[in-house]
Image: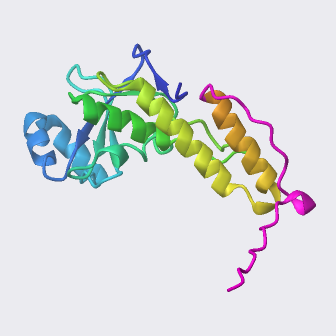
Amino acid sequence: MSSCLTSDSSSAVPITPVTKDSLPQWLERHPGRREWLNLIGFKAEPNSFAFLPPSDGDRTRVLAGVGEGESIWAFAGLPTSLPEGVYAIDTALDDAQATAAALGWSLGTYAFTRYKSAKRAPASLVWPTRSDHAEVDRITKGVFLARDLINTPTEDMGPDQLIDAGAAIARDAGASDPAHRPISGHARPRPRARRRRRL
């Protein structure tokens, strides 16, 4: 399971996504927020956000700027930009949008921690309704593994380590772990010489 995604919404701060084009309409419905957003200069640029203090019975919430047509990466910058805590997207999303939002959030929490710990814990997101939990977990796990392999320097990521990584993937998938020998040094197989045919 993606550790940054939770089913507990009891203390979640709502996130309202807005685009540069939809912000004026949102302000028409919430005129009391206009002065505050003008004061802090929020323009709904992609990857920007603004905290809205409680007002007129409405709880603290976050306005998040997203780009037109964005899906997976619309919320990917928020886990390490927002303060630690639990948040929930309060906009209705279809199946694909909900899964993309959860996946983007999950991918946005990646940190390479082989040699040092992350500076902070990422913010958590309540699983969007209708999101595919299994798909998000599967893709996140694969992407994180690939990034770990890429980010590991070559002195710690040779053929033997790649073999071990592949064997671990096979075991996680329920496949048998075939016997193998490290293909390093003199154990590396040599190409067979081709024989010339006489004419």
**Secondary structure mostly seen in the magenta stretch:** loop
Q: Residue at x 64, y 56 (%)?
A: 150
Q: Residue at x 43, y 32 (%)?
A: 136
The answer to whether residue 61 of the structure is visible from this angle is: yes
Q: Position of residue 99 (x, y in %)?
A: 34, 32
State the image quarter where residue 169 is shown: top right
State the image quarter where residue 186 is shown: bottom right
In the image, farthest residue toward the right? 186
Q: Is residue 56 above or below residue 168?
A: above
Residue 196 belongs to the span the image colors magenta = yes
Q: Position of residue 131 (x, y in %)?
A: 33, 26
- Residue 172 left/right relative to 77: right
The C terminus sits in image quarter = bottom right
Q: Which residue is nearer to you in this view: 29 or 191?
A: 191
Q: Which residue is nearer to you in this view: 40 or 120?
A: 120
Residue stretch in magenta: 173-199
